[in-house]
Structure formats: C-alpha cells, structure tokens
Amino acid sequence: MNDSILFKIVFINKSKVYELYARDVFSSEIYGFIYIAELVFDQNQSIVIDPAEDKLREEFENVNVLHLPVQSVIRIEEVKKKKSCKIRDIKQGDNIAQFPGIPMKSK
C-alpha cells in the first residue's frame, strides 16, 4: 500500500460532525457501509496538544476498522497533507442534514 495516500473523512455521529484521516478507504463488504482503516492521528510529541484530536484518539484507540453507514458520510477527500482532526456541533444554518431514519426513543 502507498503510505502517501491520505483520505479525509467527514461524517455525522451523534449530532456532531467528525473529521478523521485514514490511509485505507473503500466500500465495505457489509452492504451500505464504508470501510475505513489505518486511522491517522498526530504523532508529534510537542508541548501543545489539540484537545479535539486527543479526544478522537481516545475514542478510536482500539479500532482496527471503522464501518460507517453510507448515509452518515458527508464527504471523503483524498488530500496531500493532514490537518487537525475535529469534532464540531452542527450549527443552525449549516448546510448539513442527517439522513432521515428511525427516530430513537428518549428514556
């Protein structure tokens, strides 16, 4: 595999927009899902730590392969350089909407 290929994956999870980077992305063998593997996080040991990236690293630290439902994926881009991973709220006026599904009952 070519280590220079890098993908930026933007998807919706729990009413938040996640931005992750990965080296391996393609259609999953599970119908309706996208296969994402080899997640990439900053490896530098600098004094400044990005809290959003740190939170994502903790959330996905034991994940070998991520299978995302197609309807939750907003965009997949092949990029030249990795930027910071992010988690952000969906703001009113954003041109982002979650695919309609079965509403979850609140407890």
Image: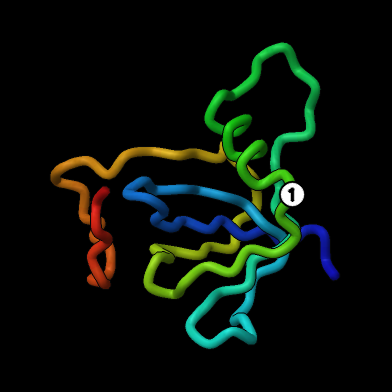
Q: Which class describes the residues within 10 Å of circle 1: few (<14), some (14-19), or many (20+)?
A: few
Tell whether 51 sits left or right of 14.
right
Return the residue found at the far top. Answer: 47
Picture residue at 49% right of the left edge, 39% below the top: 86
Picture residue at 61% right of the left edge, 42% below the top: 59
Q: Judge by depth and name the residue closer to the eye, 50 or 103.
A: 103
Q: Give the amino acid at mark 1.
A: Asn
Location of residue 16 in the rendering, given as x and y in whole percent from the top left corner: 36, 46
Picture residue at 64% right of the left edge, 19% below the top: 49
Return the residue found at the far right. Answer: 1
Image vertical order of residue 20 relative to residue 44, above or below: below
Q: How many marks?
A: 1
Picture residue at 52% right of the left edge, 77% below the top: 33
Location of residue 28 in the rendering, given as x and y in whole percent from the top left corner: 62, 81
Location of residue 61 in the rendering, given as x and y in whole percent from the top left corner: 72, 44
Q: Judge by depth and name the residue closer to the eye, 66 or 78.
A: 66
Question: Would you identify the image quadrant in which residue 2 lies?
Answer: bottom right
Question: Would you identify the image quadrant in which residue 89 lies?
Answer: top left
Q: Tell me the quarter of the image containing the N terminus.
A: bottom right
Image vertical order of residue 43 relative to residue 31, above or below: above
Tell whether 106 sits left or right of 65.
left
Image vertical order of residue 97 relative to residue 107, above or below: below
Q: How is the image coloured?
A: rainbow
Tell whether 106 sits left or right of 76.
left
Location of residue 48 in the rendering, given as x and y in whole percent from the top left corner: 66, 15
The residue identified by callout 1 is 62
Return the residue found at the far front. Answer: 107
| Mark 1, secondary structure of its residue | loop
Return the residue found at the far left. Answer: 93
